[in-house]
Amino acid sequence: MKNYYLLWLLLVPFQIFSQDYKLFTATSQKLFTDYPVPFNTYSLSIESAKQIGTDSVYYNFFKLSSDRIESDTCEFWGENWCNQQNAPAWAGPKIEFDNVFTYRFYNLNNDTLNFLFTAAINGPVRFYEDSLQKFSIEFIKTDTLTVLEQPDSAVYFQIAHTDLDGNPINSALNGEHIIISKEFGLVRFFVIDSFPSVLKPISLIGNVSPTAGFYQLTNEMVYDYQAGDEIQYKETSWYQPPAPPWYYYTRFRKHIFLEREQTDDYLKYSIRQELFYQDSVGIEIDTISKQYLRSETIAEIPFEKYDGSTRSLQLSAYCDELRWTYSIDAMDGPVYCEADTCWGTDDTQGPPEFRYSSYTLGLGLHTYTRDRNWDMGESYHIQKRIVFFKKDAEECGDEVIVGIQNFEKSLAQLTLNPNPATTVVRISSSVEIRRFLLTDLYGNLLFVQSVSNKEITIDVSPFSDGLYFVRILLKNGEVATKKLVVSKKF
């Protein structure tokens, strides 16, 4: 009886520990990113949970399998083939919890990773081993931790990666921590599905219930401008009848933000708009207003869930700065079959329309594209994308400027010779040239080079006959845009 009582006393701390520090629940929604340097995101959103005996089993399927199945219950275009939405996310195909202190994760090879999350075991406990290596965890401490800017109690485990003889292996996981917070659950972990081929630590950056951190994208986060910010868009359109009556154009639209007003519900901006068309000398200038409902949601966890479109969230480089960018790649025709939990294609009466959108924090809608190509019928291409912006007085991209003759008046000593050119063109300036860019009529960048000279020579022989633009940045800060004609007839 005394031995049983002693065992009960030992088990009570184990159970209290496990109950207070669960990794997640059946309703958890979490967002992780690469650690220590963020780049990609990894959502954990429990799709379903089952009770099997004393175990809780969690599934987080929200991606499409690459294998196709034939549906017996749903009809799709052509044959009844579809892709099931049962591909595992980063955490593997399923997670089992014995509701005490043991978690079992499964990788894509169906290998089992057994985690014993308890403070009562002395020394490392192995959670995975193969013919070459083994991985263990060891309880380190219980401490106060700031999680998503909120203080919380957390337990720390340290990972040891060794060979079979116990010699340390210098890897991305060796010495890393697994951290479990009392309120937020799993805080620091690693990617399971491709383990151990890929060893990738991850860290929590967003959480729902309790809600904190980066758990959704809203208008307030995306359309966040200040007075003095500038954004220039390039807009293009072409169509082939019988497509809708759109027009052929290449134009540039610049927004200069004059005033910002923030209410409880809206962000309101007063904007100077400058609009001009490619190879034009005229410009339309107007003052416009825009407002955005601050709380309107653009996307939320799981950011990567397939919903008829492919979605992703990652840090993208804009000059010397990284910004979170959310992308949506979609096309007409995806149909969901609930009976088989699969997606197939509807009959779109010809090639589908493809759409791509990307939103960047602090810049707004960065790229929007609609595209359909069909030799037998309607074809069109519409695109709007940011080509230049200025935020916090820092510039990024190459601004396109209208009114070429205005620059020629202020920079009369800048010449292109010969023009038209057949093989080479020589650019001469009374002010030192720092950089030049060559674009075609549609704004596509063909050549760029940094220099430190008053005279440069460009080889134009590889280029077809036509009109081009040379954009020149001078040492004194001035920018000039010059027309260049390439003609092999001269």
Image (tube, grey):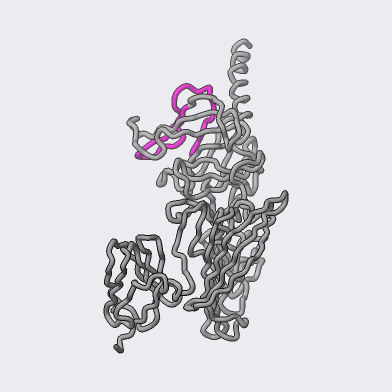
Which image quarter is the C terminus in? bottom left
Counting from the top left corner in percent of width and height, residue 473 is at 38, 64
The residue that appears at 40% across and 69% down in the rendered structure is 480
The residue that appears at 41% across and 66% down in the rendered structure is 479
The residue that appears at 47% across and 69% down in the rendered structure is 401
Counting from the top left corner in percent of width and height, residue 63 is at 56, 56
Does the image show residue 383? yes
Q: How many marks?
A: 0
Q: Is residue 2 magenta-colored?
A: no
The residue that appears at 54% across and 27% down in the rendered structure is 118
Q: Could you say which quadrant of the image residue 336 lies in?
A: bottom right
- Viewer-proximal residue among 124 and 174: 174
Answer above or below: position of 100 versus 303: above
- Viewer-proximal residue among 226 and 145: 226
Look at the image and give the residue range highlighted in magenta: 110-138
Q: Could you say which quadrant of the image residue 485 lies in?
A: bottom left
Which image quarter is the N terminus in? top right
Does the image show residue 70? no
Counting from the top left corner in percent of width and height, residue 327 is at 54, 59
Q: Name the side, left or right, on which 269 lies relative to 198.
A: right
Q: Name the side, left or right, on which 455 lies relative to 127.
A: left
Answer above or below: position of 220 versus 247: above
Q: Name the side, left or right, on which 407 lies relative to 93.
A: left
Counting from the top left corner in percent of width and height, residue 124 is at 44, 27
Q: Is residue 124 magenta-colored?
A: yes
